[in-house]
Structure formats: structure tokens, C-alpha cells
């Protein structure tokens, strides 16, 4: 039986407090005025060797040309736009971190459901770890929804009535993109995922002391049904919670793309927590073949993610349709480092490190690859949200770090609390002996 140590409790609570304090500070300092933004733009223009942005420094010049008034108006509009982008940054940073940890939990729930539905023989020794990670899903998803509704137009421009009134394209999507229907869909998603997590965990615990296998059969049936529900709702969730920050753009591959990201992130966290518990003397029934299979999934789904990324990017870029290619044009223009950096972290690094079968059995190799993969998929979510909300006013600083600390602390606290609530070995599972003696 795992005991939630006081040291880990203190560490996770400290992360929450420091993260919350840091985010609140960054939030309070982000509310710059229009005049401050104009000053900022003037300073930036003064460093422009070509003088392209010098309009902000010269609009009041007594010798301005006849078009000075129009230029001043355009300058004010641009300054106001930049001001909104700066205001949006703390909201976007909080939302990215909240979604990232929620998607880890949801990815683990999908992987857990696959293990039950496929009646897998290798993985039952890892079920308690998976169940603990999915404990975060309900509070994590509700937090994501709460941030989305609270931040509103700071993240989703279709929630701003003034924008919708002057945007015919968004008006045509208003049957789907409206706050009421958005909230109802979200509650259906969260309710369905959480119900499956609750009932599957209930049957898994009950199976430990059951005299027959009825709970195993029930869990099998619920898992098969859940996977059908999941594949539909995960796609719609990705449209609502991620893709609709860019309401003028859409991709039919986007649901699968987000799925691949959450799936590999979830499997990576299973591996990292398993290695941590094993190093602490728990999970003695987990052997290097289990770690090998987890690392194999990390490797395989990283390749799958890359396939989806390239398929989405290549088709849109090659077709060069303006309303489609703008999504990637803005990211390549303003987000070169995170855009191409995530390809190194999500594909090239795991491909090279985890290709060798022997390396998949070495814990520190898996930990090294796992940390890079998780950073890479955080950057992936960053790339999905930031360009539409913050534009070129991004950098990685206090809002992002504090939001990560806040939700990392909450995630660790809830996951390790859940681990302490049940025996780590699910003894009643009919495949448990096969799993204990599994060798690749």
C-alpha cells in the first residue's frame, strides 16, 4: 500500500502556492494602458533600422503629411490591438497549463480503457497508476471549462458580441459557437468521461475481493462503450476548447492530432510515475519488460503524432489556400523557435533515443525521453493557443512558469493522494499473474 509522504505533500502544495502567487502577480502587471503601449511601440520603432514602425513616433509632428491623421488613426488601432494581446497573455498561459495537465489525465483514461477493452495481459500491474492519474480528470476538466468561460473573449473572440456583429463568418458558425451550447457540450463531455472513470474504478476495486469475474466483464463492456463515446467527444472537445480560438480556420485532422498529443503525454506520465514508485520500493512486480512496452508506446505514438502533424501541415501548405495557410504562416513568422523546436522534442529526440530496444528498458533513458516529450507537447499546446490570443507579443516568462507550477502541484497532489487509497496490485484481475510474469 502506497503512503502519500509529507515531503511530497509539502512540495506539491508549495508549487500550488508559488504558482498561484506568481500568476496573480503577472496578471496584475499585465493591464497596461493604451498610452503605455504607444510608448512601447515607439521604443520598438526607434530600434527598427528601416523605420517601418516609426509612425508612432511621428504622428504628432508639426510637419506631418496630409495623410498623418489617417496614419494616427491606424496607429491607435494597432496600439489598441497590441494592448489586448498583452492583456490576453496571463489568461492564455493559465489556460494552456490547465489544458495540458487535463489532457494528460484524459489520455491516460483512453489508454486505460483500451487495456480493459482489449483484455490486455501485460498491463494490469499498472492499472492502479493509471486510475490514480485519471483521478485528476474531473477537477482538471472543470477548471479548464471555468477558465474558458471566465476568460471569455480574451481566449475566444467568438464570445465577444462586438466581434461577432462585424464578422459574417463567425455569425454563420454561431449555431455551434455560442456560450450556452459550448457549456452544455463541455458538461456532457466531462460528465461522460468522469462517469466512466468512476464506474471503472469502482469495478476494479470490487474485483479485488470478488469470488467471480462479473466485475471484470462489466468493466470490459463499459470500457468498449466508453471508447466509442471518447473518440467522438474528444474530437468535439478539441474543436471547442482549442481550435475555436481560431474561428476562421479549421482542419478535419485536428481531433486526431490533439488525440495523439494527449495519448503520448498520458503514456509518458504513466511511465514516469511507475519508475518513481519502483525507485521508492513500490511496484516490485513491475519489471523492465513493462517499462519496455511503455517506452515502445511512447516511441510509436510519437511517430503517429509526427505523421498527423506532417499530414495536416503539408496538405494545407501545398494547397496554399489563404484562409487555411494563414494558420501556419503566423506560427512560422512569429513562433519559429517553439514551432520547429517541438518537432525536435516530439519526433527527432524520442525517435533517436527510444529506437533501440535495449534503451527502452533503462529507466533513466525513459525518464530523459519522457521529460523532453512532455515539454514538447506543452509547447505544442502553447503553439495552438498563443498565436491566436497573444500574437507576436509572446515570450516564456512568469505567467507561463507560474501557471505550470500551479497545475503541476495540483496534479501531483491529487494523483499521489489517489495512489494511497487502494492497493497498488489489482489482485482480482484474471490476467494479473500473466502481467506479473510478463516478459517481452
Image (tube, grey):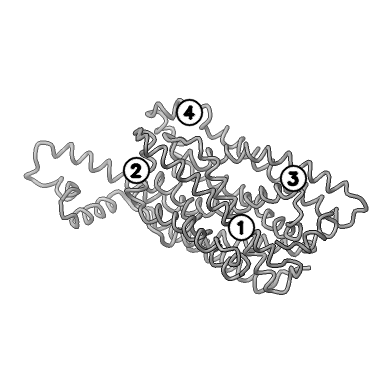
Mark 2 lies on a secondary structure that is helix
Q: Nearer the viewer, mark 2 or mark 1?
A: 1
Q: Earlier in the sequence, mark 2 or mark 1?
A: 1
For residue 63, which quarter of the picture? top left
Q: Earlier in the sequence, mark 3 or mark 1?
A: 3
Dots 3 and 4: beta carbons under 8 Å? no
Residue to which mark 4 is pinned: 173
Between marks 3 and 4, how big is the CA–CA gap?
37 Å
State left or right for residue 432 relative to residue 10. right
Residue depicted at 39% across the width and 47% down the height? 387
Give percent across and percent down for residue 206: 85, 53
Residue to which mark 3 is pinned: 117
Count of marks overlaid on the render: 4
Residue to which mark 1 is pinned: 296
Q: Nearer the viewer, mark 3 or mark 4?
A: 3
Graded by Cα atoms within 10 Å as few (under 14), some (14 to 19) or many (20 or more), the crowding at tag 1 reads: some
Give percent across and percent down for residue 342: 44, 55
Q: Earlier in the sequence, mark 2 or mark 3?
A: 3
Q: Earlier in the sequence, mark 4 or mark 1?
A: 4
Q: Which of the pair 151/259 is nearer the observer?
A: 259
Mark 4 lies on a secondary structure that is loop
Q: Which of the pair 34/440 is nearer the observer?
A: 440
Q: Is residue 68 above or below residue 359?
A: above
Amino acid at each position: 500500500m502506497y503512503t502519500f509522504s509529507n515531503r511530497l505533500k509539502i512540495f506539491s502544495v508549495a508549487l500550488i502556492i508559488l504558482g498561484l502567487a506568481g500568476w496573480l502577480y503577472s496578471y496584475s502587471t499585465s493591464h497596461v494602458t493604451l498610452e503605455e503601449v504607444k510608448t512601447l511601440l515607439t521604443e520598438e520603432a526607434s530600434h527598427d533600422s528601416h523605420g517601418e514602425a516609426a509612425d508612432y513616433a511621428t504622428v504628432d509632428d508639426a510637419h506631418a503629411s496630409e495623410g498623418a491623421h489617417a496614419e494616427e488613426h491606424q496607429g491607435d488601432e494597432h496600439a489598441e490591438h497590441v494592448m489586448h494581446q498583452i492583456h490576453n497573455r496571463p489568461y492564455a498561459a493559465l489556460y494552456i497549463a490547465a489544458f495540458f495537465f487535463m489532457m494528460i489525465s484524459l489520455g491516460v483514461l483512453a489508454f486505460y480503457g483500451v487495456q480493459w477493452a482489449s483484455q490486455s495481459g501485460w498491463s494490469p500491474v499498472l492499472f492502479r497508476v493509471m486510475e490514480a492519474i485519471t483521478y485528476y480528470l474531473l477537477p482538471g476538466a472543470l477548471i479548464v471549462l471555468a477558465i474558458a468561460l471566465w476568460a471569455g473573449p480574451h481566449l475566444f473572440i467568438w464570445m465577444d458580441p462586438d466581434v461577432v456583429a462585424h464578422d459574417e463568418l463567425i455569425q454563420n458558425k454561431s449555431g455551434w459557437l455560442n456560450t450556452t451550447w459550448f457549456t452544455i457540450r463541455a458538461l456532457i463531455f466531462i460528465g461522460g468521461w468522469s462517469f466512466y472513470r468512476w464506474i471503472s474504478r469502482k469495478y476494479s476495486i470490487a474485483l479485488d475481493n470478488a469470488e467471480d469475474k462479473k466485475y471484470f466483464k462489466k468493466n470490459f463492456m463499459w470500457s468498449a462503450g466508453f471508447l466509442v463515446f471518447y473518440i467522438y467527444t474528444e474530437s468535439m472537445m478539441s474543436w471547442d476548447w482549442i481550435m475555436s480560438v481560431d474561428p476562421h480556420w479549421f482542419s478535419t485532422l485536428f481531433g486526431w492530432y490533439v488525440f495523439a498529443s494527449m495519448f503520448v503525454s498520458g503514456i509518458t506520465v504513466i511511465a514516469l510515475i511507475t519508475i518513481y514508485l519502483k525507485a521508492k520500493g513500490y511496484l516490485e512486480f513491475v519489471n523492465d519488460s513493462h517499462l519496455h512496452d511503455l517506452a515502445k508506446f511512447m516511441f510509436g505514438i510519437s511517430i503517429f503524432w509526427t505523421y498527423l502533424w506532417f499530414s495536416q501541415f503539408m496538405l494545407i501548405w501545398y494547397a496554399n489556400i489563404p484562409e487555411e495557410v494563414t494558420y501556419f504562416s503566423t506560427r512560422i513568422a512569429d513562433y519559429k523557435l517553439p514551432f520547429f523546436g517541438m518537432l525536435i522534442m516530439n519526433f527527432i529526440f524520442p525517435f533517436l533515443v527510444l529506437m533501440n530496444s535495449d534503451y527502452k528498458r533503462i529507466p533513466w533513458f525513459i525518464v530523459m525521453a519522457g521529460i523532453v516529450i512532455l515539454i514538447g507537447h506543452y509547447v505544442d499546446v502553447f503553439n495552438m493557443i498563443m498565436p491566436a490570443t497573444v500574437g507576436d507579443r509572446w515570450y516564456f516568462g512568469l505567467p507561463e512558469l507560474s501557471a505550470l507550477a500551479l497545475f503541476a502541484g495540483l496534479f501531483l497532489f491529487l494523483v499521489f493522494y489517489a495512489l494511497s487509497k487502494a492497493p497498488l496490485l489489482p489482485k482480482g484481475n484474471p490476467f494479473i499473474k500473466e502481467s506479473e510474469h510478463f516478459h517481452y
